[in-house]
């Protein structure tokens, strides 16, 4: 075997536990050949069963292992003893850490030493191997679509899902590794497998064709289909038309963004035409939401945390705002992954604590909607956590927050009932607790500790895509596509109106006029708004890169705060301390490709600098 793609596709053997005499044999066989070459495709039940495995190719990035940190940008600080965590490795510039075979800890959802589509375990799921497997599986299904015997609705559902996943997994791969071959047919050993590597734009446009076709085939709501009646009220996580339109918009906006546009041989600026196309795709999602055609709408602020976690009765978080999330493979793993990772050992967690970086917390503005560095904001450094954006109180544990809710634990619990995050406080520790002066709250329900013992009943899911993201990406696409804060894609809203939808849900006023008048002023607040709305959801690393801002000085530092508590409760001697300065060079725009696979044919090439 002499090429990269054959090597990747042969990895499917491991996924299904099938042993063949050679990769050439495998490439000429259906992965489902243990039943027959045709049986999987003959009717809707069988074919949909074939398709269901594609959903299980989505890694649950927060649970790839017991401490699977997934925030790789400027948002979190790991304890000083956790240098193996992916965020710390990336801070140091070691992007090879995405490869589990090169890491001291099998920690990253991007790769796993063994991979599986097992629907009951989040471990052993890596994006790189599973995406290629899923693309091959989608192509296998599309090739055999003519064997299907069913209604037109059933055929559209099958074809729409297959096209969506082919486009989606290519999009996922290129977001991390740049332009790649676009595999749009089932490959065999007789094919020339030295496939050309496309530019980012070329890859994105091919993905766009698949996603657009999927959007036109899939229903707005599976509950309103004949097929969907068999699983009525249980169809929420199935791919529908809005999912495809949303990812079409995201694919086009990423391709239009400065870094991707520059990597495709153009300028370090937005591609205006692609921005307009992205805005039109997002508009389709917004219209379906606002008319009630789709099941998606913004969650109310009093239930904002339902986007991320729920407690009791095996309830899944997400509805009605989350457009796409990975399957929840095993609810109990929430306790042993996210809760452990964000809870200090004195409260029953582990010492591998990730805490919000202090300078990142400063992105949370005031209740009046202004950033804290605005002279009109009313921010008071002696009472720095008063009158803040409601999302601050949802996401962040700060000094004085009640940690233990009930009366359990007696005197042993008393010292930790309230967070002491001042210098020398009971939850401050460089090696085993908060390193920054803050702790994470976004994914932690009240009572998730060894005294209240709520953590065994929590299910946490980190979304891939929420409706609020569609509104903010729509705002960005219309802003850059039409070079105006008040122009819009036909039929919906302008950039200012779109950002205000998200701000209104958060409970803060509309964007101040001083920030709404020019493209640059608006963009500065859109960057901040995205930092707050999607804090600690794994999106920030993508955003900073695509904007070509990841190497800007203001995004490299990670800091802690030190302060004393006055007897009157005020903050004394508040000061900031640099913990780490992130390493970012041009080569860090993309992850390195696996050397063993790049070397299979030199014309494929490694990413620059690696």
Image (cartoon, rainbow, N blue to C red):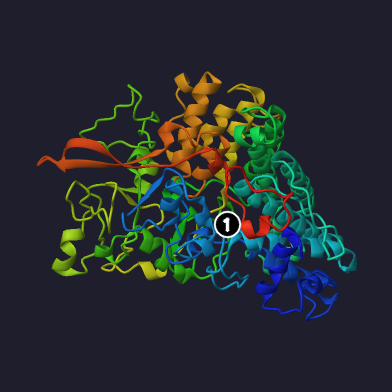
Q: Residue at x 58, y 47 (%)?
A: 610
Q: Residue at x 58, y 38 (%)?
A: 546
Q: Left or right of 64: which side holds 138?
A: right
Q: Nearer the viewer, residue 518 or 546?
A: 546
Say which residue label 1 marks.
325
Does dot 1 land on a helix, a strand or a loop? loop
Q: Left or right of 416: which side holds 191?
A: right
> Is 375 placed above or below 262 here?
above
Q: Residue at x 51, y 60 (%)?
A: 108
Residue 535 appears at what percent x and percent y? 44, 45
Q: Nearer the viewer, residue 518 or 510?
A: 518
Q: Left or right of 576: which side holds 556?
A: right
The reply to whether residue 219 is in sight is no
Neighbours of disc 1 within 10 Å: few (<14), some (14-19), many (20+): many
Residue 510 appears at what percent x and percent y? 47, 29
Count of labels in the image:
1
């Amino acid at each position: 075997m002499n090429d990269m793609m054959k090597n990747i596709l042969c990895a499917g053997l491991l996924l299904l536990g099938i042993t063949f005499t050679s990769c050439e044999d495998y490439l000429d066989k259906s992965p489902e050949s243990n039943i027959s070459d045709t049986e999987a495709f003959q009717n809707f039940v069988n074919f949909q069963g074939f398709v269901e495995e594609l959903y299980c190719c989505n890694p649950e990035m927060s649970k790839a292992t017991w401490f699977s940190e997934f925030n790789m940008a400027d948002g979190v600080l790991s304890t000083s003893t956790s240098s193996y965590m992916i965020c710390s490795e990336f801070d140091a510039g070691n992007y090879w850490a995405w490869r589990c075979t090169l890491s001291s800890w099998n920690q990253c959802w991007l790769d796993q030493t063994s991979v599986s589509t097992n629907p009951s375990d989040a471990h052993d799921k890596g994006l790189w191997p599973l995406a290629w497997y899923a693309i091959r599986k989608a192509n296998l299904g599309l090739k055999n679509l003519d064997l299907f015997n069913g209604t037109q609705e059933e055929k559209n559902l099958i074809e729409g899902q297959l096209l969506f996943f082919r486009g989606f997994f290519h999009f996922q791969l290129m977001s991390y590794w740049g332009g790649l071959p676009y595999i749009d047919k089932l490959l065999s050993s007789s094919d020339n497998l030295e496939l050309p590597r496309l530019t980012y734009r070329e890859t994105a446009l091919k993905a766009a064709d698949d996603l657009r076709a999927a959007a036109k085939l899939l229903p707005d709501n599976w509950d309103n289909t004949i097929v969907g009646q068999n699983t009525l009220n249980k169809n929420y996580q199935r791919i529908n038309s809005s999912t495809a339109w949303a990812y079409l918009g995201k694919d086009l906006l990423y391709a239009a963004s400065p870094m991707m546009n520059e990597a495709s041989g153009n300028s370090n600026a937005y591609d205006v035409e692609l921005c307009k196309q992205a805005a039109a795709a997002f508009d389709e999602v917004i219209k379906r939401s606002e008319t009630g055609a789709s099941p998606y709408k913004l969650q109310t602020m009093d239930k904002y945390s339902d986007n991320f976690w729920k407690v009791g009765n095996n309830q899944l978080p997400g509805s009605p705002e989350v457009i796409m999330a990975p399957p929840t493979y095993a609810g109990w793993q929430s306790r042993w992954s996210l809760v452990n990772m964000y809870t200090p050992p004195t409260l029953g967690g582990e010492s591998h604590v990730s805490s919000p970086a202090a300078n990142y917390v400063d992105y949370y503005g005031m209740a009046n909607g202004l950033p804290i560095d605005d002279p009109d904001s009313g921010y008071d450094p002696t009472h720095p956590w008063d009158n803040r954006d409601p999302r601050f109180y949802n996401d962040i544990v700060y000094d004085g927050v009640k940690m233990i809710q009930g009366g359990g634990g007696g005197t042993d619990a008393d010292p930790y009932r309230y967070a002491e995050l001042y210098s020398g406080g009971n939850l401050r520790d460089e090696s085993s607790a908060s390193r920054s002066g803050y702790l994470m709250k976004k994914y932690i329900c009240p009572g998730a500790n060894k005294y209240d013992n709520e953590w065994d009943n929590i299910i946490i899911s980190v979304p891939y895509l929420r409706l609020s993201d569609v509104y903010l990406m729509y705002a960005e696409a219309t802003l850059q596509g039409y070079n105006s804060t008040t122009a819009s894609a036909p039929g919906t809203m302008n950039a200012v109106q779109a950002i205000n939808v998200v701000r209104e849900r958060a409970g803060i006023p509309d964007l101040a006029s001083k920030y709404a008048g020019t493209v640059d002023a608006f963009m500065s607040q859109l960057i901040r708004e995205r930092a707050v709305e999607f804090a600690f959801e794994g999106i920030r690393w993508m955003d900073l890169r695509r904007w070509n801002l990841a190497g800007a000085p203001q995004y490299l530092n990670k800091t802690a705060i030190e302060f004393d508590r006055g007897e009157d409760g005020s903050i004394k001697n508040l000061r900031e301390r640099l913990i780490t300065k992130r390493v970012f060079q041009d080569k860090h725009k993309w992850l390195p490709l696996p050397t063993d696979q790049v070397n299979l044919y030199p014309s494929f090439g490694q990413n620059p600098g690696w």
